Image (cartoon, rainbow, N blue to C red):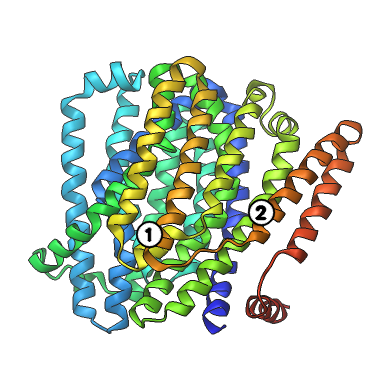
Amino acid sequence: MNSLFFLLQSFSFVFLGSGFAYVLGIINHIIISRILGPSNLGIVVVGISWINIFSNIATFGLVGYLPRILSYYKSKHDNKSIYVIIRSSFILVFIFALLISLLLMIFKDFFEKKILKYSSFYFFLLLILGNFLISFYKIISSFVRSFKQYIWKIIFEDISFRIFRIFLFFFFLFLFKDKIFAGLGSYLSAYLIVSLVLLLLLHFKIVSFIECFKNFSLSKKITLELISNSWPLFLSAFSLLFISNVTSLMLNIFKDSYSVGLFDVAFKLGFLLSFFALSFQYTGLPILTEYVAKNDSISVKNLYIFFTKFLVLLSLLFCGIILIYSKNIIFTLYGSDYVYSYMLLNILVLAASFRNFSGPGGNILVAFNKTKLNLLMELITALFSFSFNWLLIPKFGAMGSAFAILFAYFIRSLVMCFLVYYTCKIHPFTKEYFLVFLYFLISLGISYWLSKFNYYLGFTFILIFCFCLYLYFPFNREEKEVFLSFLRIKK
């Protein structure tokens, strides 16, 4: 019960903060998308996608492994090893980012003409700088996560970043009169400010970077440990790009930036659900790792089962609302230029729901140091995603990419649940789940029918029915006590 209560406190704070930040992000995205238009938005999205790919390669899976290894040495109060890990991480990332930038400059013409389909000196320069900047930001963010500074994550990475970006967007737009430069430049500049703030906070509050960089030598033992345990996570994280970033890039290659713009709008709204799972992922891994180190398998099982139930219920609620009112939502928020995105939104919200239905299984595998199994899962997902995109995008465009993501996440959820059960002999599902899904489908059909006669009637019905699901859903006695006691404390 203590383990559930402790994690619920951390999760709820990150969840509420991330939810508020995500709303700010959607507002930013709406404003920027309306100003840029679908084609210019597509170019900016492609640039950001490439920067994410470059930084993913440069960080080499360290982002996923650092929270585990730093939490481990922190529990043993081994500050010397922590200093060496931090120094080694920065040096490794700098070397990888430098190599990527050199290759990018060598193949600049081919990259701009054949892949990017957009030629601009300033845009290319931002890609180079963004490679270094986002790579270092991801490492700094993983330090924040490792030391469980969730309030910093919420205030600076989630909320402040979005505030900085919208102000910088209008500043650059006024200063340079270039919409594309303003879109990408504001994104990178906002992350630069956040990175510097987090670096200063870590230095003065948590760990002295002066101690970390008294010398610039690499520890052979630590370096080998980081690389050997990070490469499966690197391939896992890189594989996930096929589900998000690479989909946009393939749309740009096979179609055009206009299709990318429409897809991006639907993806942002459809994956509004994702911050539920990401909130647990951020708070859960360090805590789960500590329980594994203490051989507390009961707490691990309870946390996994409880939060999978929680994620499923929230997913059903949001999925139902978006499926019924997708066209109205797109038209109201983004305007007539993006109205055809509503069909993509219907498909992508289902894909996001499938992602949540598998629960925090990835954290479970990493906490038990089953990084290779986690890699296997992501490689299988990437293979199916890439294959579906390759087959469907040339024929069906953005609709094909949406279906590719839906199929990929469905397969990923199945593989995830199987691997967690195979490794830990735990799964969250009971026969009550099938009844809940059946009732939800019935309520969804009735709500859709009612919405044809009265806009608000359908919306009210699905809210009431989902509330009934919350009351009916089979939380056990311990889980209910933890949740109720948490609510009493919050009051």
Quick check: 260 left or right of 382?
right
Whole-percent x and y of residue 372?
A: 27, 56
Q: Please report the residue visible at 55 percent of the width from the left and 77 percent of the height from the top.
A: 4
Q: Amino acid at mark 2?
A: Phe
The residue under the point 66% across, 57% down is: 313
Residue drawn at x 68%, y 48% as measured from the top left:
318
User: Dot 1 lies on which element?
Assistant: helix
Rendered residue at 82%/44% (across/down) = 459
Q: Give the number of the mark in front: 2 or 1.
A: 2
Q: Which residue is mark 2?
A: 434
Q: Which residue is mark 1?
A: 141
Residue 438 in the image, given as x and y percentages of width and height: 72, 49
Position of residue 45 measured from the top left corner of the image (x, y, whole percent): 45, 32
| Cα separation between marks 2 and 1 | 39 Å
The reply to whether dot 2 and dot 1 touch (C-beta < 8 Å) is: no
Which residue extends farthest right?
453
Task: Looking at the picture, tell me which residue is in the foreground, 331 or 175.
Answer: 331
Observer able to see residue 69: yes
Q: Quadrant of the N terminus?
A: bottom right
Quadrant location of residue 380?
A: top left
